Image (tube, helix red, strand yellow):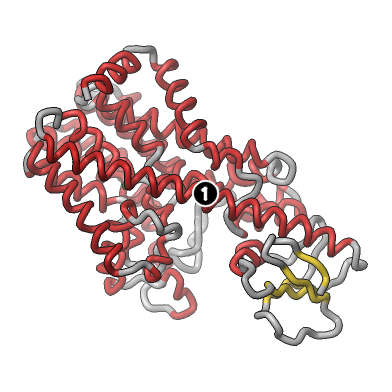
Amino acid sequence: MKYINKILLNLSTGSNAFIFFILLAFTVIALFLVLANPGYFSHDEFQKLDHIQRHGFADYVFRYVRIAQGDAFGTPVRPLAFLIQGILAFAMDDFPFLVHFAAIAMHVLVAYLFFRATVQMGGSKSLGLLAAFLFIINPMTTLATAWSAALMDRLYIIFGLLALLAADQYIKKNGNLLNLLYIFVFSSLAIFSKETAIILPGLLLLFLIIDLNTIKLPNFWHAMAAWTAPVITFILLRLPAIIASFGQPKISAYKASLDNAPEGVLVYIAYPFLPTLTEANNWIFQSSGAVIFAVFLHALLLITLLRVFGYKAAVAYCIFYLMFLLPVLMIPIKAAHYMYASGLALSLAVAAVLLQTSNLFIYRVITIVGIFVLLAHTMALQVFVYRLGSCMTRAYTSTESTYLSNTLPTSINFQAVPGAPEHVLHRLFTGRNQIGNSSPVSLTISKWGTPVDSNTLSVVMNSRCIVSKK
């Protein structure tokens, strides 16, 4: 531990630019498979590309880059995030490396701002740097980085951390009005990136945990007002959609109910320490023993935090681990990318315990075991995403070739041979009606052996993800 402390101390004494470069270099190495992925994660990325190819970028901007009430809260209203996603779509076909590098760069920026916030709010540079390193390789952040369409999860946290830095400056340095403006602007940009930003004013609880007397300062309440003003405005705008999200069958994927919360808490507590779990919704296929072990290991880390730093640290960890998940706990779907911001709490807690337990052998063992489990999970997620992207690329390329060589049919039915990854077809073609620049093309997927209409081109995908005429 002394050797690690020495390395961290030497690195953290560099300039801010040097620290950012170190974090970038570390991320490129640690998440190499994310950067090298030749394909993408799901149909979400392709749907945006299809729209631009079919209707043009101006129409895409008109359709997605706007503020609207929406039919339900599950309808995304993320103008800034969609604008960036639309720009990145231009590189999707020919330069997937650039799309993934943009995700890596945003992830690094979050880690760097995390480092800055940790130090500015009283932590050591060694603690901030180690927490940033752990955040980069945290399995809670891997899918949100590897899935380019999840850029909004990274984006809203970037602006949340910027608002926190501005709030710290404003509250502690007797109120520079420019910092108050920064808080308002960054809060607005965060809410334009993802709806989950409605929870970000909760970060101001950090000041009260550090010093409860902060609640008496007028500047604290000024900062709270500046941060919550865009949030309240957004909620009022979307209030009918929020109300509609409770109990309507037509929006079952996002139908909110308190009944979903206990299961959500269980899944999100266990997820980091379940190395065999990729997408959170698949947790039902995990053995009960594996889930119990994951929850137990997480509980051990919480107990370690409690014993080393006291109840205040343990309570703060629980608050900030779950806070970012509050907007999604009541919906039935579970998704790993929702956990991106919660990775901040876990990374800081593990870093703090690791740097403070040099003479407490059992706590150090628990923490190191936890880190190895987290690293194993991160590596498994990278391999999963890389294989998935490679498979989808082969499937899509061979589909285009088959489509062009069969006189551009208006209807295609896909079937996966037994043993082939049928889920890849669903990931690739759900909600789409376009092959290359050609549309509309009816794209359907059916089980192996299902009869297909004679007017529909019947194609099959083999176990190597190659699509060909049946």
**Picture quadrant of residue 277:** bottom left
Where is residue 264 shown, x and y percent of the image?
31, 64
**Side of 320 relative to 142 (left or right):** left
Residue underneath mark 1: 383
- Callout 1, which amino acid? Val
Which residue is depicted at the point 64% across and 68% down? 420
Rendered-image quadrant of the N terminus: top left
Query: Image height check: is 400 above or below 460?
Result: above
Query: Image height check: is 176 above or below 276?
Result: above
**Side of 384 relative to 329 (left or right):** right
Where is residue 196 shown, x and y percent of the image?
38, 52
Which residue is depicted at the point 54% across and 42% down? 34
**Picture quadrant of residue 284:** bottom left
Which residue is depicted at the point 64% across and 36% down? 98
Q: Residue furthest right?
A: 407
**Picture quadrant of residue 353:** top left
